[in-house]
Image: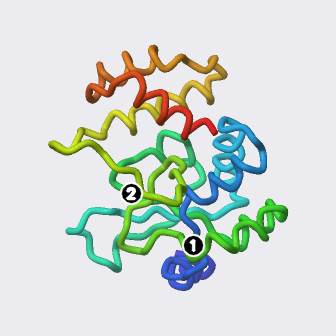
Amino acid sequence: MSKRRKKVEQLLLDSPNWMPVAEAFRLLNGLLGNHYLAVKDLTDAVADKRLPCMRRLIASEVAPDQDRKIVPPADATPVYFGREDSAFFVWRPKFEKIWPALAASAAPHAASSARDDEPTPATTASIDDKPQRRRPGPQPELRWRTALARELIRRARAGEPEPTAEQMCELVQEKSGKPDVRTVQKEMKNLLS
């Protein structure tokens, strides 16, 4: 292993300068005003080696000193970042160097970034003052949300038109659960805003 690679792994993987990908995506989405461009630009920055990215495994059986690794640029695809077994982070100093307009707006959110032991969602998180309540009863199956995000990203990368909520509801019902159309509409609004 080269000295530089060894230095990156030893010095950076436990640094507080790692920013959750969800936060980076939210900031880029706000700057560009377009979900698809934010996905494209963030993925491209990792793929062309301008923005270091770290993958952290969520599984509890993985030793703490073995759960982090630098994402190879060739793996930087929206599908890879949609993995459920990992949380992803980008190197904040490089992110701010690439998008300096976001450096000031990123500072207030640094304190609200995910803890090291919490998984980071691949999509943007809703930031509300009040937590949203759910109806009483059994916990709903949430895999459809991941399927929805993956399909929206796939369509964006392929240049396909944005689907309707009804189309997406049918698709995710087939793949991983049974959300109602209104719930899918709300989730699409969160993902695409």
**x%, y% of residue 94?**
73, 68
The amino acid sitting under disc 1 is Trp
The quadrant in which residue 101 appears is bottom right
Residue depicted at 62% across the width and 28% down the height: 156
Q: Is residue 45 above or below residue 193?
A: below
* Residue at 73% over, 60% down: 50
**Residue indicated by mark 1:** 18
Q: Position of residue 76 (x, y in %)?
A: 57, 48
Q: Which mark is residue 88?
A: none
Residue found at x 60% / y 53%: 73
Q: Callout 2, which amino acid? A: Ser
Q: How would you rate the neighbour count of disc 2 (Cα within 10 Å): few for under 14, some for 14-19, many for 20 or more?
A: many
Query: Cβ–Cβ below 8 Å for labels 2 and 1?
Result: no
Q: 129 and 51: which one is in front?
A: 129
Q: Residue furthest right?
A: 101
Q: Position of residue 128 (x, y in %)?
A: 53, 55
Q: Secondary structure at mark 1?
A: strand
CA distance for labels 2 and 1: 15 Å
Q: Is residue 35 left or right of residue 169?
A: right
What colouring style does the render use?
A: rainbow
> What's the mark number on residue 86?
2
Give the camera-side residue of 32 and 2.
Answer: 32
Q: Position of residue 71 (x, y in %)?
A: 52, 59
Image height check: is 187 above or below 9? above
